[in-house]
Image (tube, helix red, strand yellow):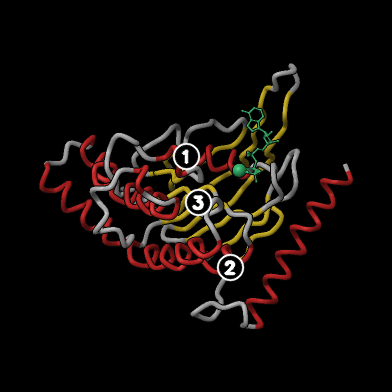
Amino acid sequence: MSWRVLRLEGVGKDFDRADGGVAQVLRDVTLTVERGAFFTLLGPSGCGKSTLLNIVAGFEGATTGGVSLDDSPVTGPGTDRTVIFQDVSNALFPWMNARENVEFGPKMARLGARARQELSEKYLRLVGLDADGGKFPFELSGGMKQRIQIARALANDPDILLMDEPFAALDAITKKHLQVEFRKIWNETGKTIFYITHDIFEALLLSTHLAVMTAGPEAGIKEIFQIDLEEPRTPSNPDFAALYSRVESLIDEEVQRMRAR
Ligand SMILES: Nc1ncnc2c1ncn2[C@@H]1O[C@H](COP(=O)(O)OP(=O)(O)OP(=O)(O)O)[C@@H](O)[C@H]1O
Ligand SMILES: [Mg+2]
């Protein structure tokens, strides 16, 4: 499917709470993500980032407003979007080896054995695990499982990867490796990425666009940055450092506001 922009327009979300009340989570979120962009959401814990990602995924409906690809409304999950979860322990099928996990989507799409094998070889190589295709999830480290999850997502050839804190559960060194690798993968595949992180450094390293959210309830967009830092991006660059402090202070403001309530 060819489209140019993913559009969120006036998106609001209320949840019915277990106590009979209503949680007013999101209010009037409007933003556009150009095809090929690496768009990142940052914001205080509990503000509604995952909720917004779930709405884009089509897992949740918006209470007001909506999501569209150009002029086609998103009404549910679709093969044009794939979600990558933070929790790698449950993301892979434990009874399938790494290769079978990667080939699962193509198999569901009724691709033949030969075509599936080509895809799994290609994407296992891309994530640096071409020698580990025969291993089962219990034989893989957290970082390896996350790489397999990424390979599996790419093998489905979605237009958009929706990633909710994908590297948050990994140790610092593995995380750093995967950040660098994932930026290369994004470069090579040209996928559109909708990404959530709490890590400002990661956001500045990876993204083309960064949206800082306000604290909930009724969270919205506080500010959107287009990031065109000199490559390779490094925190020793004064522009990087300045943008880091700017974003950090915006988030601090929101955390203070939340605490003051
Ligand atoms: N199904 C639900 N029913 C009721 N309230 C919900 C539901 N899902 C989420 N919420 C509420 O919506 C708000 C936003 O949750 P969400 O998980 O989107 O936040 P988040 O920004 O992803 O937080 P974190 O950074 O901690 O992951 C929270 O107050 C949460 O309690
Ligand atoms: Mg979340």
Callout 1: helix, strand or loop? helix
Can you tell which quarter of the image residue 198 is in? Answer: bottom right
Q: Nearer the viewer, mark 2 or mark 1?
A: 2
Disc 3 residue type (three-letter): Pro
Can you tell which quarter of the image residue 83 is in? Answer: top left
Q: Nearer the viewer, mark 1 or mark 3?
A: 3
Which residue is rendered at x = 66% and y = 83% of the image? 238
Badge 3, how many Cα within 10 Å: few under 14, some, many 20+? many
Disc 2 residue type (three-letter): Leu
* Picture disc at residue 204: 2
* Number of disc labels: 3
Residue that label 3 marks = 166
Q: CA distance from mark 1 to mark 3?
A: 15 Å
Is residue 218 visible in the rendered image? The answer is yes
In the rendered structure, are the residues bearing label 2 and label 1 in contact, judged by CB atoms less than 8 Å apart? no
Q: x, y percentage for residue 71? A: 44, 44
